Amino acid sequence: MAGKNKDQLIVLGAGWLGQPLCLQQLAKGWDVQGTHRSAEHQHAFQRQLVFADQQLAHQLDLHNAWWVCAIPPRSRHADSHYLATLKLAIELAGTMNAKGFLLCSSTAVYAQDNLTYTEQSEIKVSTARQQPLIDAEQLVLNAGGKVLRLGGLIGPEREPGRFVAGKELQSSSNQTVNMVQQQDVINAIVTVLENWQVAAPIYNVVNPAHPTKADYYQQKCQQYGTTPPTFTSDESAERIIDGSAIESLGFNYQFAI
């Protein structure tokens, strides 16, 4: 495909998740631009995007592209201007004739009650962490975009056997995990873009395996020869995020958590 028909992608926040997405689609022959805050670029696809003085300063120039917002949750603190950045980015996408705008959100949008949550579950705000997630989703949905609610992310440099080793976790050993591997998320993003017209507005992206934290972290720590974590409680706690709806688009979870 040449000229105007070439697939094009803009990734806001080309970091741990966004950068491999950029690299994969580049390898498939797409035109790609991925943003970061730095003015110095290691890769040709990188572009600076910075929120300053209530405006977006940016180097983006791909028109008729798909837009994916993969700005990570840690950037969502009040001083990061996450929502203001997102609002301006959606407006910018509109002026650049974006084909669609996809937001990487989080399953932290759901309450902590021990239930099974689907995309149809009612969202009840009980933590400060939920509100910016809900507000961000609303901005995107109101603009005709779509939302992926991602489970706990694992993959290169995010191995559970390392990051929980020896810690005391403020949760129950019997709490179920809701995790997903990096490559499955990237595949889910591409699946939604490729099926945009028939895709639902919201999908959970969570691996169908839900072991308890005790079993899961025990196994992972064993793998890395690290000390398993301890827990503040042993209460039964089955909070399960159902990530099966996206499979109706032909997507399959392929990577073990």
Image (cartoon, rainbow, N blue to C red):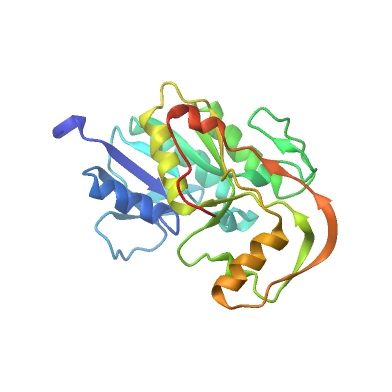
Rendering quarter of residue 168: bottom right
Compared with 184, 44 (above or below) is below
The answer to whether residue 64 is left or right of residue 132 is left
Q: Is residue 50 above or below residue 103?
A: below
Q: Residue at x 33, y 50 (%)?
A: 22
Image spot of residue 64 (x, y percent): 29, 32
Vertical placement of 72 versus 62: above or below? below
Q: Residue at x 78, y 60 (%)?
A: 171
When asked about the image quadrant of residue 192, the answer is top left
**How many numbered callouts?**
0
Nearer to the camera, 193 or 9: 193
The correct choice, above or below, for 86 with respect to 171 in the image is: above
Report x, y in % for residue 232. Answer: 83, 66
- On the question of residue 35 being in view, the answer is no
Left or right: where does residue 212 sit relative to residue 38?
right
Q: Residue at x 55, y 34 (%)?
A: 203
Task: Tell me, yes or no, if residue 121 can be seen here.
Answer: yes
Viewer-proximal residue, 206 or 17?
206
- The quarter of the image holding the N terminus is top left
Closer to the camera, 205 or 40?
A: 205
Q: Residue at x 55, y 30 (%)?
A: 245
**Where residue 220 appears, x then y in whole percent?**
59, 67
Q: Position of residue 107 (x, y in %)?
A: 63, 44
Asked if residue 128 lies left or right of residue 207, the reply is right
252 or 77: nearer the eye?
A: 252
Residue extending furthest toward the top: 198
Identify the image quadrant of the C terminus: bottom right
